[in-house]
């Protein structure tokens, strides 16, 4: 098989599309969505509903990344760090990117419709957030909170999809608070990669505005606040334990401690962004999921 024919093979195009939307980064949002599902009693769902929830989550995240890449394509083309991405490098046509956006949005809306009329009515809200947040860095250094808000929707969406009665939303709300400050904090770390470029091009970020050192201190403060929200989620998810011995809360609290340590490591390894951003964050997400499941087990099961 020649190089040219391999380049246009269906498998090659799928790899290109997956790279375009950084499909592997779904590992950031999927554990948060699952944590939202397990944050309240009554998490036993039919297999078909599980499938719809996962489809909606993956399609929404694909839609968000496609929007981000499309909106930022001109900035990506002049940034030395990003000019090798699929659109600016020419490995993917603009029409393909738009088609991927449309298809993923269609799957997301269809999954929401299948989940129920309430979910279909609420479906535009995440799409609105996905459209707005890429533009925030053009107007405000607080743009990192837009990314945080987008990920904060994941535990809320998982909770709502699994609990149509919306009973006991406290743990899911606490998880959303955690996600908001966690993701905003690590997006500040990520912005250190583009400090000089952002200043030169008038792109706003905490790093370009305050300088690297002060911005990283704010990132650390955001992660400290995130830890408090996560502790609240653990306590609320395991709330019925109050009728028994305190030691029963040890497993979720130990897992909360693991999350706290991982957040501190993100700060310590901020100079190594790929390590802090792409590796530690995946472990944080799964540790959060494990903590919530442990808290639910303590409170009397699922």
Image (cartoon, rainbow, N blue to C red):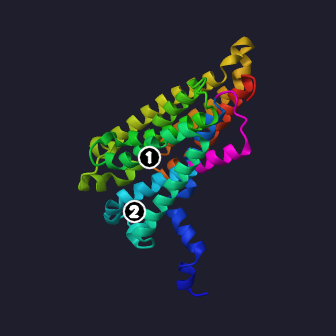
Q: Residue lying at the far bottom in this picture: please name it.
A: 2
Residue at 63 percent across and 30 percent down: it is 39
Marks 1 and 2, the one that precedes in the sequence? 2
Q: Under tag 2, what secondary structure?
A: loop
In the rendered image, the quadrant that contains the N terminus is bottom right
Verify CB contact (< 8 Å) between mark 1 and mark 2.
no
Instruction: Tell me where residue 6 appears, x and y as whole percent.
Output: 57, 81
Number of residues whose C-alpha sits closer than 10 Å to that of mark 2, classed few (under 14), some (14–19) or many (20 or more): some
Residue identifier under label 2: 82
Residue 151: image tag: none
Residue identifier under label 1: 127
In the rendered image, the quadrant that contains the C terminus is top right
Which residue range is magenta in the image? 40-56
Q: Residue lying at the far top in this picture: please name it.
A: 243
Residue at 70 percent across and 24 percent down: it is 250
Instruction: Tell me where residue 244 appears, x and y as whole percent.
Output: 75, 13
Instruction: Tell me where residue 44 appears, x and y as whole percent.
Output: 73, 35
Side of 235 where 87 appears, left or right: left
Q: Is residue 38 magenta?
A: no
Quote the CA–CA distance across marks 1 and 2: 24 Å
Instruction: Tell me where residue 247 appears, x and y as whole percent.
Output: 73, 18
């Amino acid at each position: 098989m020649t190089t040219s024919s391999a380049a246009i093979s269906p498998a090659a195009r799928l790899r290109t599309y997956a790279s375009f939307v950084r499909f592997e980064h779904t590992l950031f949002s999927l554990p948060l969505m699952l944590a939202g599902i397990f944050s309240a009693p009554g998490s036993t769902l039919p297999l078909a509903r599980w499938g719809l929830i996962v489809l909606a989550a993956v399609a929404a995240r694909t839609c968000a990344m496609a929007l981000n890449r499309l909106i930022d394509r001109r900035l990506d083309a002049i940034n030395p760090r990003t000019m090798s991405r699929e659109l600016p490098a020419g490995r993917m046509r603009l029409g393909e990117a738009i088609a991927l956006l449309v298809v993923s949005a269609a799957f997301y809306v269809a999954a929401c419709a299948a989940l129920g009329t309430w979910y279909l009515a609420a479906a535009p809200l995440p799409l609105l957030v996905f459209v707005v947040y890429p533009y925030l860095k053009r107007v405000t250094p607080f743009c990192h909170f837009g990314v945080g808000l987008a990920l904060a929707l994941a535990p809320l969406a998982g909770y709502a999809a699994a609990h149509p009665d919306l009973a006991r939303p406290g743990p899911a709300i606490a998880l959303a608070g955690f996600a908001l400050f966690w993701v905003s904090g690590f997006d500040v770390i990520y912005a250190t990669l583009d400090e000089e470029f952002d200043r030169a091009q008038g792109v706003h970020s905490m790093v370009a505005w305050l300088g690297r050192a002060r911005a990283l201190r704010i990132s650390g403060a955001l992660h400290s606040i995130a830890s408090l929200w996560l502790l609240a989620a653990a306590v609320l998810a395991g709330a019925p334990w109050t009728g028994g011995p305190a030691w029963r809360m040890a497993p979720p609290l130990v897992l909360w401690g693991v999350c706290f340590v991982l957040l501190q490591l993100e700060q310590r390894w901020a100079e190594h962004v790929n390590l802090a951003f792409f590796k530690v964050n995946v472990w944080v997400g799964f540790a959060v999921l494990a903590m919530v499941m442990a808290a639910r087990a303590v409170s009397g099961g699922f």
